[in-house]
Amino acid sequence: MRSSADIPDLPMDAYTLTKEQYQTYLKTQRSLVRQCMARFGFDFRAMDAVLDSGEVPDLRPDKTRYYFVIDADTVAASGYRAPDRDRRVEGNDGEGEDTTPTEAERAVLVGSNAGERLGGEQVPKGGCQGEANHETLGEDGTDAFLQVPNDRVGPRSRADADERVKEVFRKWSACMKDSGYDYDDPMQANDDDRWGPAAPAGQAEIQVAKADVACKQKTNLVGVWWAVQAAYEKQYVEDNAERMADAKRTIDVVMRNSARLAGSGV
């Protein structure tokens, strides 16, 4: 694999929302919660910051970084840095409006006062969050599907410890030595203390990163690493077939309901 574009999806990606799907889901949840809270007289904006900042996380692995640096053009410009990740939040200087839920808002949000009437409205079971979940996840749905990204930690750890991956690391390390660099594995090169937090990357860092990528390509390190992890993920899916199938069904329901609700003006 010569670039991140060559990396196929991993088996567990089919059971994980894309970043765009996750943002759609969160926006639908926000709209539903706000509408519900408005019925009780609250202008609820506690969920705004996460969505409006552009910081919605990607629940699937970032192919440009998951196996550390892999794109030759990127490292030639920025070494081990990730130039496409702008950590600034436009318009947020840390002095914005405090949207932390009040005690009264939280009670309605989570339904700790469910059944009580406020301003003529009865607080629903599970509160406004429960009502929003019901609308997006369906009658019996839960948000357990959001745990799938955490589940892949096990297969990744098993892949990292697999002798096939260790062997390709040794080949990569020997290749790096031929270029004058002494690292046991790509993690050591990526996390070298010499790179530090300062930007931009220095010439020494760029040269190491370029050799790193060249040795990955020469040894097919990413191809081997991906294949071993894919095998462990496939086994994990098979061993947890019922739960994973439920996650996939829930994702389908979430996306259908999100599209329907967006079409209705939510």
Image: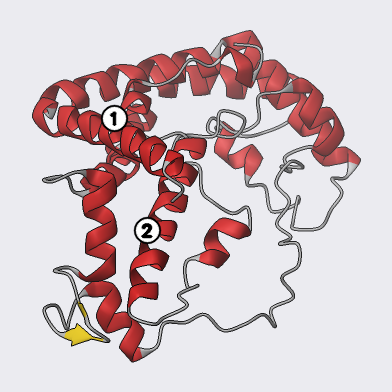
* Crowd around label 2: few <14 · some 14–19 · many ≥20 (10 Å): many
Quarter placement of the N terminus: top right
Give the image quarter of residue 210: top right
Q: Tag 1: residue type?
A: Asp
What is the total number of numbered labels drawn onto the structure image?
2
The residue depicted at 40 percent of the width and 14 percent of the height is 227
Q: Which mark is residue 167?
A: none
| Disc 2 versus disc 1: nearer the observer | 2
Q: Tag 2: residue type?
A: Leu
Q: Which of disc 1 and disc 2 is earlier in sequence?
A: 2
Depth order, front residue of 115/253: 115
The residue depicted at 28 percent of the width and 64 percent of the height is 129
On the image, the x and y values in percent for residue 119 come to 27, 86
On the image, the x and y values in percent for residue 71 come to 71, 23
Q: Indicate left or right for 79 with 104 as reference.
A: right
SS under mark 2: helix
Q: How is the image coloured?
A: secondary structure
Residue 157 appearing in the image: no
Give the image quarter of residue 202: top right
SS under mark 1: helix
Q: Which mark is residue 32?
A: 2
* Crowd around label 1: few <14 · some 14–19 · many ≥20 (10 Å): some
Residue 144 appearing in the image: yes
The residue depicted at 65 percent of the width and 38 percent of the height is 189
The residue depicted at 65 percent of the width and 31 percent of the height is 69
Q: Which mark is residue 252?
A: 1
Depth order, front residue of 50/74: 50
Marks 2,1: beta carbons within 8 A: no
